[in-house]
Amino acid sequence: MPHNADRGIALQRKYYTDTAERYEEMHVLEPGSDPADVDFIISMLRMLQARTLLDVGTASGRTLRNLKSAIPELRICGLEPVGALLDQAVARGSSTSGALIQGKGQTLPFADKSFDAVCEFATLHHVPDPAAVVGEMLRVAKKALFLSDCNRFGQGHLLLRLAKLGLYKARLWGAFNQIRTGGKGYRITEGDGVAYSYSVYDSFDQIAQWAHRIILVPGDKTKPGSWMHPLLTSGSIILCATREW
């Protein structure tokens, strides 16, 4: 792994350790935090008759608590690499909603098809190699995968959105992003720590090889304004992928 990626991971884990006690209050506006988003995923889980679910990057366990409250019979496991966040999960009662495990999304400690569904909420834009995490999520998923995360193509004014899409399609976005971040590949903000430029569309082709159906839902309250919705209109997106088994 490149040196910058190692440094980014270390900085992000320190950020979460330092802010663990305030995590839920600081991240109420992250993708997947809107009750309507959670209700959509709950509805899909019920339709799929999912009995087991893994939440990758569970943090303080807010997702575990919400899903367990809505579907009491669902067996949930939350995986999180930062010990301080797991301590907060226990303190907030998340351990009563499901098992809590310390581990990395890049190397999930589970057998193939261990869970009916696997989800992540605003985790992938914090990792240097989202494809590795998504690959592991697909490996352990049996019926469904849920991503609720950023969409760079729906952020900024229209010309900027089109420019980002053009650079991406021309395979120049990675080089451009390195230049604009001074070679680091990430940016650091007080409210989000280390963040990489990510869109759920980055993972679309990878997921499409596994899934039989993919549903894309805007993660913010943006009125559909063009045929390019939600690609160019929504700054966050919920991706639901299902597979016949």
Image (cartoon, rainbow, N blue to C red):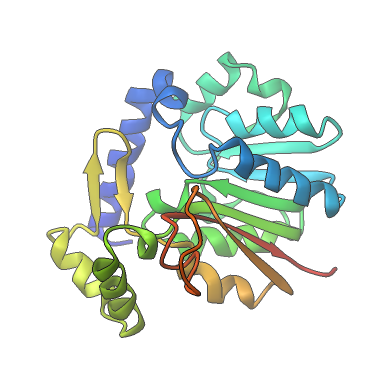
- The answer to which image quadrant residue 193 occupies is top left
Q: Nearer the viewer, residue 220 or 124?
A: 220
Q: Nearer the viewer, residue 35 or 169?
A: 35
Q: Quadrant of the C terminus?
A: bottom right
Marks counted in the figure total: 0
Q: Nearer the viewer, residue 119 or 82?
A: 119
Q: Quadrant of the N terminus?
A: bottom left
x and y percentages locating residue 147 in the rendered image = 57, 55
Residue at 36% from the left image edge and 82% from the top image edge: 169
Looking at the image, residue 124 lies above or below residue 1: above
Task: From the viewer's perspective, tell me whether residue 58 is left or right of residue 165.
Answer: right
- The answer to which image quadrant residue 39 occupies is top right
x and y percentages locating residue 167 in the rendered image = 28, 78
Q: Is residue 102 visible?
A: no
x and y percentages locating residue 239 in the rendered image = 59, 60
Residue at 29% from the left image edge and 71% from the top image edge: 164
Residue at 55% from the left image edge and 38% from the top image edge: 34
Task: From the viewer's perspective, tell me whether residue 69 is left or right of residue 124.
Answer: right
Q: Is residue 91 visible?
A: yes
- The answer to which image quadrant residue 96 occupies is top right
Looking at the image, residue 99 lies above or below residue 207: above
Task: From the viewer's perspective, tell me whether residue 26 is left or right of residue 174.
Answer: right
**Residue lying farthest top?**
91
x and y percentages locating residue 107 in the rendered image = 55, 54
**Residue lying farthest bottom?**
170
Task: From the viewer's perspective, tell me whether residue 82 is left or right of residue 97.
Answer: left
Residue at 74% from the left image edge and 43% from the top image edge: 42
